[in-house]
Amino acid sequence: MNQTDTPVRSGMVAIVGPPNAGKSTLMNALLGQKISIVTPKPQTTRNRILGVVNDEGYQIVLIDTPGLHKADQPLNREMVRIALESLSEVDAVLFLLDASASLPEKLQAEKDRELSEYMARLQAPAILILNKVDLLDKEKLLPLIEMYARIHPFQAVLPMSALHADGTERLIAEILQILPLGPRYYPDDIPTDATERFLAAEIIREKIFLQIGQEVPYSSAVLIESFKEETEKGMVTIHAAIVVERTSQKGIIIGKGGGTLKRIGTAARRDIEKMMEQKVLLKLWVKVKKNWSQDERFLKELGYF
């Protein structure tokens, strides 16, 4: 019996929670490498992204999901659907909240009601993670744990800082208390099932969020139009279109003298080269597709449906 056939603690674990709670940061911390893009802006993640944590005695298949929020646009509704669908497909759920986020009493009560509604959908044991505790006054932590423990019978309530990977070992130990013995679903050397083409598009999208401080990133998408590995040259050539909804947004992304687009391209190319461990020629351009975020056919082309 080889290592792949030997039963280990294994299973699917969804990371869910509201926007900007740190879900992608937690995914990357548990993997020990960057798979999910991370920005300070909420609702950065649009797809389910899978990451695999391997060890001699276990394999944890993590699913990073879009943030749970009230949605009215087709793209946002699909993002929430993806996240909620994950709740019924997994062996365990990590429900992540920003412990440092302070809300007025009325809004906090509304947030707690929403949390209860999400919890009612759970079909698997859940661990509540109070993230960003490094930003929280210590005397507020215990009342917070007690408050959320009353909302749902969580398997555990863990304070941690995903950004600093503080608390990851304890979290893995709690996950392993839930997961059954079973097979490894993926080979040991595969950290994600996402294609390099998909990850390249995500990296470009991350740089748009980081380079542009307005609402424009939410109206932008990245479409990889060509992804060619040239073995003889030892490089990859990528042609990608940044799609926006209005002409004014195109001007913002291009920037004065093309400066903003150049910065996006340079930053993205460096990260894609790091990911692929070879030289990359990245060619970016911007095109306008009016109201693309409400066009279900185009959303399917982008892989959101």
Image (cartoon, helix red, strand yellow):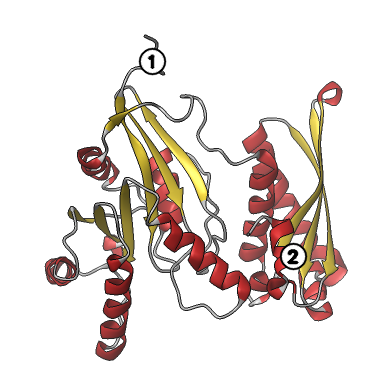
Quadrant holding the N terminus: top left
In the rendered image, residue 93, in percent from the top left (x then y), is placed at 32, 53
Q: Amino acid at mark 1?
A: Gln
Residue in front for this viewpoint, 90 or 266: 90
Q: Position of residue 188 (x, y in %)?
A: 46, 24
Callout 1 secondary element: loop
Q: Quadrant of residue 212?
A: bottom right
Q: Nearer the viewer, mark 1 or mark 2?
A: 2
Relative to 249, is 83 above or below? above
Quadrant of the image containing the C terminus:
bottom right
> Would you name the residue on which mark 1 appears?
3
Horizontally, residue 219 falls left or right of residue 39, namely right
Q: Quadrant of residue 86?
A: bottom left
Which residue does the numbered mark 2 point to in the structure image?
297
* Residue at figure coordinates x 32%, y 54% from the top left: 94
Residue shown at the point (64%, 51%) measured from the top left: 203
Q: Residue furthest top?
A: 1
The residue at the point 30 percent across, 84 percent down is 110
